[in-house]
């Protein structure tokens, strides 16, 4: 799946570098490493685990400068200076993970 994300980046005009592949593959690995213990502790799958894992990965990736914040205009941060880019990254990536978990994965809340 990391290769597919990298291919989408390259098709959109990004250069193919080992760092880009490592960020995509490593981010997905971290996402699953965070999600699996949550499911083990709670006794079953839940879309909230996906939201939490996606939010953590989004926050870390944006704050480290490795990920951008999709679907958010740059002027948003000028209009709302109290919302930092890492905070918006956590919200956007967590929301995307939750939507995918419920619609495609069929996970309950």
Image: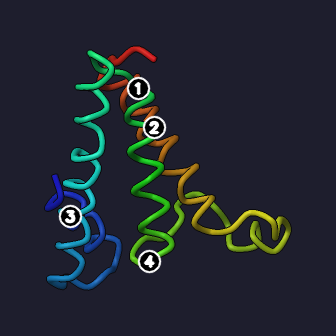
Cα separation, mark 1 vs mark 2, equals 6 Å
15 left or right of 1 in image: right
Disc 1, SS:
helix
Looking at marks 1 and 3 on the same chain, the residue that comes earlier in the sequence is marked by 3
- The residue that mark 1 highlights is 47
Cα separation, mark 3 vs mark 2, equals 18 Å
- The residue that mark 3 highlights is 26
Disc 2, SS:
helix
Q: Which mark is residue 15?
A: none
Looking at marks 4 and 1 on the same chain, the residue that comes earlier in the sequence is marked by 1
Q: Nearer the viewer, residue 95 or 71?
A: 95
Q: Nearer the viewer, residue 58 or 21?
A: 58
Q: Which mark is residue 64?
A: 4
Where does the image place residue 83, in percent across and percent down from the top left?
74, 63
Query: Does the CB distance between marks 3 and 4 fall below 8 Å?
Result: no
Res 52 → quadrant? top left
The correct choice, above or below, for 56 with respect to 15 in the image is: above
- Determine crowd level at label 3: few under 14, some 14-19, many 20+ residues with C-alpha closer than 10 A: few
Q: Residue at x 19, y 54 (%)?
A: 29
- The residue that mark 2 highlights is 51
Q: Nearer the viewer, residue 74 or 90?
A: 90
Query: Does the CB distance between marks 1 and 2 fall below 8 Å?
Result: yes
Looking at marks 4 and 2 on the same chain, the residue that comes earlier in the sequence is marked by 2
- Determine crowd level at label 4: few under 14, some 14-19, many 20+ residues with C-alpha closer than 10 A: few
Looking at marks 3 and 4 on the same chain, the residue that comes earlier in the sequence is marked by 3
Disc 3, SS:
helix
Cα separation, mark 1 vs mark 3, equals 21 Å
Q: Residue at x 55, y 50 (%)?
A: 92
Cα separation, mark 4 vs mark 1, equals 26 Å
Cα separation, mark 3 vs mark 4, equals 14 Å
Q: Residue at x 54, y 59 (%)?
A: 89
Residue pushed farthest right? 79
């Amino acid at each position: 799946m990391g290769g597919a994300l990298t291919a989408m980046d390259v098709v959109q005009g990004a250069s193919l570098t080992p760092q880009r592949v490592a960020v995509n593959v490593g981010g997905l690995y971290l996402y699953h490493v965070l999600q699996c213990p949550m499911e083990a502790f709670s006794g079953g799958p839940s879309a909230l685990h996906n939201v939490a894992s996606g939010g953590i990965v989004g926050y870390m990736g944006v704050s480290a400068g490795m990920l951008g914040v999709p679907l958010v205009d740059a002027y948003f941060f000028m209009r709302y200076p109290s919302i930092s880019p890492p905070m918006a990254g956590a919200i956007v990536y967590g929301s995307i993970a939750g939507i995918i978990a419920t619609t495609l994965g069929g996970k309950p809340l």
